Image (spheres, grey):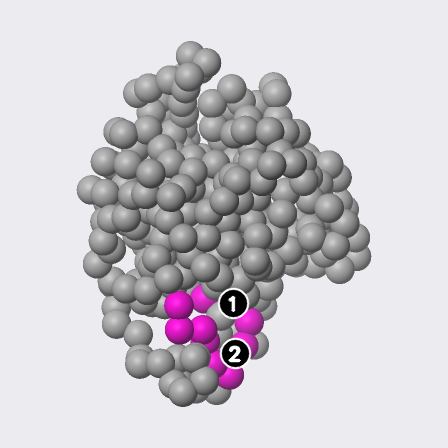
Amino acid sequence: MRTLVALTALVAIAACSGDGKSPAGPEAVQPLTGKAADGLPNRPVLVVKVDNSPRALPQVGLSAADLVVEELVEGGLTRLAVMYYSALPHTVAPVRSVRTSDIGIAAPTGGALVASGGAARVLTSIREAGLTVVTEGARGFSRDPSRRAPYNLVVDPTQLMAEVSELDPPAQPYLPWASGEATLPPGAPASSATVRFSPTHTTQWDWTGTKWQRADDLAAEGDRFMPDNLLVLRVATRDAGYTDPAGNPVPETVLTGSGDAILLTNGRSIEARWSKPDAGTPLAFTDPAGASLPIPPGRTWIELVPKTGDVTVR
């Protein structure tokens, strides 16, 4: 089934130039990484839902992503919202279903959620939020016979772009990216981070000296997403009001309001606060002194850790 809900663009983007990129001045930056760019792709962001359980082995296509968000789902497991804009891989797998938590994650991109499907009430909530979701049955989806269902759905983002051609490129940066003049608080040394979402799932990170790496990465060597930044947000969760087929209550992450955060970058840990007044507004951060905290340009992984979870940085 394919569900495609129209999105009202927040801000119009300049018309496409002859090389397929939107015109950009010398100060243009990639909205999902903050990196300098001499031109931006004339396409929307794709936010692909990817399974993050051991049955997802191997996760495919994460190495091409700009930004990844890890969120809690039922059974204490997590799922990934993998964002593509600057580059598109030919395969992302395994693609899974949407949750209402994805509204606050995807809305600031102005792009499309890409998923296997979703509960009717979830799709209704996404529609009412003004988001686009593209599901199995659209161009670019296929089933991999070497995988077991439901972990065998794959998507080709290059083909799927034809399904969302009416959407605009992102109109705002996803995070408050630092400029060349910005400085960060000194923070404390950090060589590892243990992020416990639930008794059944923990994500372990190690600093390699140049990047952060998942200790139990589910992607094959050479296809891993190794971020420059980790952003750990403590968030409230609530009952989404329905259960999965196994009878597990489905949680909903509340990505509005404010809470504690940790920025892990360049082998340092910086205490912070996050804030987000509504679903469509990007995240903002302040340091312990209350000053605005910019995020260093680079690829970023965001952990949305429930308040019942634990975070240990060493």
Residue 32 visible within the image: no
Task: Find residue 121 and report its horizontal and vertical position in percent.
Answer: 26, 29
- 54 displayed left or right of 253: right
In the figure, 164 relative to 214: above or below? below
Q: CA distance from mark 1 to mark 2?
A: 10 Å
Q: Residue at x 24, y 55 (%)?
A: 7
Q: Residue at x 56, y 33 (%)?
A: 151
Compare residues 178 and 72 and report the one nearer the observer: 72
Task: Find residue 234 and report its horizontal and vertical position in percent.
Answer: 49, 36
Amino acid type at image mark 1: Ser
Secondary element at tag 1: loop
**Membership of 36 in magenta stretch:** yes
Q: Residue at x 75, y 60 (%)?
A: 210
Residue 269 visible within the image: yes
**Residue pointed to by mark 1:** 86
Task: Find residue 194 and report its horizontal and vertical position in percent.
Answer: 68, 35
In the figure, 84 relative to 255: above or below? below
Task: Find residue 252 and report its horizontal and vertical position in percent.
Answer: 38, 29
Amino acid type at image mark 2: Ala
| Labels 1 & 2 near each other (Cβ < 8 A) | yes
Q: Which residues are magenta?
A: 31-43
Instruction: Please state, as top left, top right, bottom left or bottom right, where the C terminus lies in the image.
Output: top right
Q: Quadrant of residue 181?
A: bottom right
**Membership of 41 in magenta stretch:** yes
**Residue pointed to by mark 2:** 37
Which numbered tag is attached to residue 14?
Answer: none
Secondary element at tag 2: loop
Compare residues 218 and 251 and report the one nearer the observer: 218
Q: Which numbered disc, 1 or 2, marks the residue that appears first in the sequence?
A: 2
